[in-house]
Image (cartoon, rainbow, N blue to C red):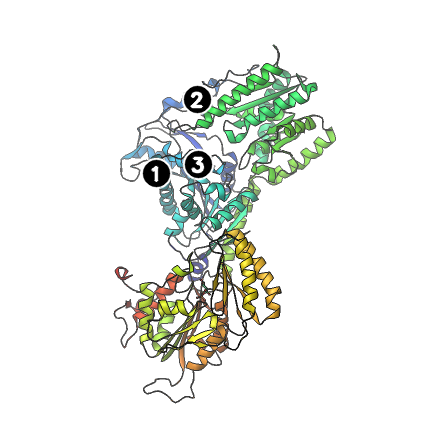
């Protein structure tokens, strides 16, 4: 991914950038199911599913919040009018065609060969421009949720007369087939990759189309909130095009462990896509933890419990379990029409306890486990036979008629069918079947009637982001007090602590918990219900929306207000450099002049930096030093041929003056007895941490864990550090220093700060006899020190100490390489070694009496945005 400026830098450059009060929510589907009528108004029906999200949008769009809200979303599969009578259509006009739960006293026949109904193929639907505009107008004037539709078609951009919608389901395929399955720990067989490539290309294009649409609507200061796994590339696409944009991302689904995510061929792209956001939200702590660890293990970015440091920016990660619109659910559930259906249901099962399950037909919903546990329950507790009925409503799962169905869908359908027949065969009678299975959609009234009629709600998902049925169940049980049995694998379990938690794989325990719930005292049930109800009604969709946006604001506020180290002002640097007589340069090596790489010996300097250093060092006004933890050999091998460079090796243990071939050993008189003890400890950790290794230098010793498991490496390095500090560190004058995926030990009196002091006093010597034609005799009039890690802070400290009393502070530049939020003594920062190289080239490009030559072009006049470059063909 291309590097980018951090938000605080952009904010610092543009202090007027403030929140506008506009929120743009990006979500895959618009909140409506659309039916097209040529030349007439579009038919807009509420879309099934995602009710919590759509309620959140409605809340955000209402007068109850201070925000102006716009949703950007795909139209979804558009149905021609003829398809409106399909039984799976959500259209109210079709509800009469569906079997009604109330009318059923026996299970709907359901066998493996009966495929669940899917929408008809809708290919080649041509929508002329005028009709597109009509829909856009209808959606933009919606009284509930103002929406901008994204048209997804091959020719969506190309053809001005309209769009041809063909194979509309293709836009879901990568997300549903690859991401949804993997996020729910379902892995499909590897293929030759052709189909995946096509699906990935569609996914990529879909995200791009969203980015285009958002950018058309965006104004500086708007907050963009991206929802769910269909749009995981969008945050980075937006960030790359508008670096200062406020972007957040929320995943409604579970997020798997790194062990599972690494099976995804596009794992890096997907993770990097999300890292364009400032804030990433999850439904539960476990998912957030998995995401953090994936960023560290798969992308190699450092993370802690609260976020990730990537691309020089801080990406915060937080947990926001979604809620429902409890007040709306309650008023719907209390409707007279629902009460009538509820009464009919209770009458139908008079004298029996009702267990209710309502799930999508998807193996992750654990319907098979539920049936097995119910079977176990009837077997273990015979006293309940004929007294308990399980009403299981299972709704179809796929809306993509063209997608290759996962075998899993058919397998689970047939498994469920087998179990239902088995249980009813074994424990039923002519007049009664203990499992009533309804493979169908329910109307809203039927759904609430069912939840109200239940004595127990049973949720056995084996993986589930947030189960809103369980929240709706709690609201519906306001008066009934039926306990909720909830799988611990549902994201909801973390929030509903008072539910009865189960492991759906432990059938015996689920059976016991069913019995326990049925025999629970009324007081206990009431207390449980009261606490759950309190939770669901206070942690509702409104408080979820407010909480998420509060966090967005605080993340953005923190970034803006952070006492950030400013980005190096290259124009100032160049002008100070040019006006100075004598100049001193102190460059760290690893992480400053070269990026950190897996194998230390592979961190060799680029051609470009070598040329730039050569040019800088060729000017006799410049004293250019490399001050590194590397040993003499390495520095000599890679940079030793540059005439005029000075070197300090092993954190100050050795020095080689410019023009000399002799190394001075500054640690000569120091007893090196500590080395054996340190080697002993390092060896112990090397044996314990696979992939770690020791770098033995003449004086300093380094233990590297950059090739080890990142989490084990960090953990063991902390232990190793502690052990060294409390052991060898108390006996010898040595310092134990945490580096970048390493620990180094060297004598305390030797450090880069001492070298910096030594160099300042060597070069800044106003009392010395002036050299011929020296403009400011003996004075260092420009000092630039660049470094990236802990050991370089000693140099910054020395330089800070000298600026003012010794050097003119305005002419001293201490620069750390890393994020602006990094804790440092440096006065400026650059994001990465590439920027350091640009800077050195910029100065090197101006070497000589009259400015730009050979290396590049410098136009001081145009330097507000700083342009100085080596032409790209030379890089
Ligand atoms: O001081 P520098 O140049 O950043 O180097 C720090 C460390 O970087 C590591 O990569 C080297 O293997 C060590 O030998 C070195 O000490």
Sequence-wise first label, 2 or 1: 2
Which residue has dot 2 on it? 117
Q: Are marks 2 and 1 in contact (CB under 8 Å)?
A: no
* Mark 1 element type: helix
Which quadrant would the C terminus be assigned to in this image?
A: bottom left
Asked if residue 335 shows in the view, the reply is: no
Q: Nearer the viewer, residue 522 or 513?
A: 513
Image coords of residue 519 (percent x, y): 71, 26
Asked if residue 125 shows in the view, the reply is: yes
Front label number (3 vs 1): 1
Image coords of residue 98 (percent x, y): 48, 19
Report the disc number at residue 142. 3
Q: Nearer the viewer, residue 654 or 129?
A: 654
Which image quarter has ligand 1? bottom left
Image coords of residue 664 (percent x, y): 44, 77
Instruction: Note whether ligand 1 is within 8 Å of mark 2.
Output: no
Q: Is residue 354 above or below residue 668?
A: above
Distance from label 3 to label 1 (Cα)? 38 Å
Q: Nearer the viewer, residue 162 or 234?
A: 234
Quarter location, residue 6? bottom left
Distance from label 2 to label 1 (Cα)? 29 Å
Sequence-wise first label, 3 or 2: 2
The mark total stands at: 3
Which residue has dot 1 on it? 197
Q: Is residue 751 above or below residue 743?
A: below
Image coords of residue 220 (percent x, y): 41, 53
């Amino acid at each position: 991914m291309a590097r980018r400026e951090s938000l605080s830098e952009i904010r610092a450059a543009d202090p007027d950038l403030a929140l506008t009060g506009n929120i743009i929510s990006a979500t895959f589907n618009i909140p409506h199911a659309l039916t097209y009528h040529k030349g007439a108004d579009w038919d807009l029906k509420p879309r099934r599913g995602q009710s919590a999200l759509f309620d959140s949008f409605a809340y955000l769009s209402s007068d109850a919040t201070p925000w102006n809200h716009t949703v950007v979303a795909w139209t979804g599969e558009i149905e021609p009018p003829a398809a409106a009578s399909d039984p799976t259509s959500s259209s109210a006009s079709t509800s009469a065609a569906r079997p009604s739960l109330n009318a059923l006293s026996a299970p709907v026949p359901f066998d493996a060969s009966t495929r669940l109904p899917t929408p008809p193929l809708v290919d080649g639907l041509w929508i002329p421009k005028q009709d597109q505009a009509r829909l856009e107008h209808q959606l933009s004037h919606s009284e509930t949720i103002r929406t901008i539709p994204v048209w997804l078609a091959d020719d969506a951009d190309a053809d001005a007369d309209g769009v041809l919608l063909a194979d509309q389901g293709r836009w879901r395929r990568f997300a549903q087939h690859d991401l949804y399955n993997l996020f729910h720990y379902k892995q499909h067989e590897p293929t030759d990759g052709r189909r995946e490539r096509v699906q990935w290309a569609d996914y990529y294009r879909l995200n791009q189309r969203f980015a285009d649409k958002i950018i058309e609507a965006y104004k500086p200061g708007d907050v963009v909130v991206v929802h769910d796994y269909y749009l995981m590339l969008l945050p980075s696409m937006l960030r790359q095009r508008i670096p200062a944009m406020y972007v957040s991302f929320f995943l409604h689904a579970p997020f798997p462990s790194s062990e599972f995510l690494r099976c995804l061929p596009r794992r890096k792209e997907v993770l990097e896509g999300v890292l364009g956001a400032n804030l990433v939200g999850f439904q539960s702590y476990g998912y957030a933890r998995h995401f953090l660890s994936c960023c560290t293990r798969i992308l190699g970015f450092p993370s802690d419990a609260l976020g990730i440091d990537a691309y020089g920016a801080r990406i915060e990660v937080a947990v926001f379990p979604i809620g429902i619109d409890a007040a709306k659910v309650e008023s719907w559930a209390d409707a007279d029409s629902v009460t009538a259906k509820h009464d009919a249901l209770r009458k139908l099962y008079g004298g029996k306890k009702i267990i209710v399950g309502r799930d999508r037909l998807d193996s992750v919903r654990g319907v098979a486990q539920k049936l097995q546990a119910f079977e176990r329950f009837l077997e273990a507790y015979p006293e309940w036979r004929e007294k308990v009925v399980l009403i299981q409503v299972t709704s179809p799962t796929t809306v993509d008629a063209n997608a290759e169905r996962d075998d899993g869908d058919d397998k689970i359908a047939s498994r469920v069918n087998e179990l239902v027949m088995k249980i009813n065969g074994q424990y039923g009678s002519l007049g009664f079947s203990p499992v009533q299975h309804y493979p169908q959609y329910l109307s809203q009234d039927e759904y609430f009637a069912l939840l109200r009629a239940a004595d127990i709600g049973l949720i056995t998902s084996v993986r589930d982001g947030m189960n809103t049925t369980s929240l709706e169940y709690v609201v519906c049980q306001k008066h009934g007090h039926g306990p909720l049995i909830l799988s611990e694998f549902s994201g909801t379990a973390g929030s509903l602590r008072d539910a009865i938690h189960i492991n759906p794989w432990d059938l015996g325990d689920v059976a016991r918990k069913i019995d326990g719930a049925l025999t629970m005292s009324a007081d206990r049930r009431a207390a449980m219900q009261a606490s759950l109800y309190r939770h669901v009604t206070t942690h509702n969709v409104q408080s979820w929306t407010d909480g998420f946006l509060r966090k967005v604001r605080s993340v953005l506020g923190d970034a803006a207000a952070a006492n950030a180290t400013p980005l190096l002002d290259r124009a100032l640097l160049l002008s100070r450099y040019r006006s100075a007589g004598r100049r001193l340069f102190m460059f760290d090596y690893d992480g400053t002049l070269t990026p950190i790489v897996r194998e230390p010996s592979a961190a060799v300097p680029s051609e470009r930096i070598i040329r730039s250093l050569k040019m800088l060092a060729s000017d006799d006004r410049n004293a250019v030093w490399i001050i590194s933890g590397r040993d003499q050999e390495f520095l000599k091998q890679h940079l030793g041929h540059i005439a005029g460079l000075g070197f300090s090796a092993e954190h100050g243990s050795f020095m080689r003056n410019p023009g000399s071939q002799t190394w001075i050993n500054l640690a000569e008189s120091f007893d090196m007895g500590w080395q054996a003890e340190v080697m002993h400890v390092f060896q112990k950790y090397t044996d314990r941490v696979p992939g770690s290794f020791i770098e033995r230098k003449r004086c300093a010793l380094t233990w590297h864990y950059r090739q080890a498991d990142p989490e084990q490496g960090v953990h063991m390095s902390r232990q190793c550090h502690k052990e060294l500090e409390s052991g060898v560190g108390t006996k010898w004058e040595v310092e134990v220093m945490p580096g970048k995926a390493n620990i180094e030990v060297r004598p305390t009196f030797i450090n880069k700060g001492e070298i910096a002091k030594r160099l300042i006093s060597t070069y800044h010597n106003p009392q010395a006899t002036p050299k011929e034609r020296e403009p400011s005799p003996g004075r260092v009039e420009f000092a630039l020190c660049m470094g990236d890690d802990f050991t370089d802070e000693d140099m910054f400290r020395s330089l800070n100490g000298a600026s003012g009393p010794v050097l003119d502070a305005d002419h001293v530049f201490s620069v750390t390489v890393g994020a602006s939020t990094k804790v440092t003594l440096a006065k400026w920062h650059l994001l990465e070694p590439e920027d350091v190289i640009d800077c050195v080239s910029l100065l090197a490009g101006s070497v000589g009496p009259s400015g730009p030559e050979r290396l590049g072009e410098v136009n001081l006049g145009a330097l507000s945005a700083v342009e100085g470059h080596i032409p790209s063909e030379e890089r």
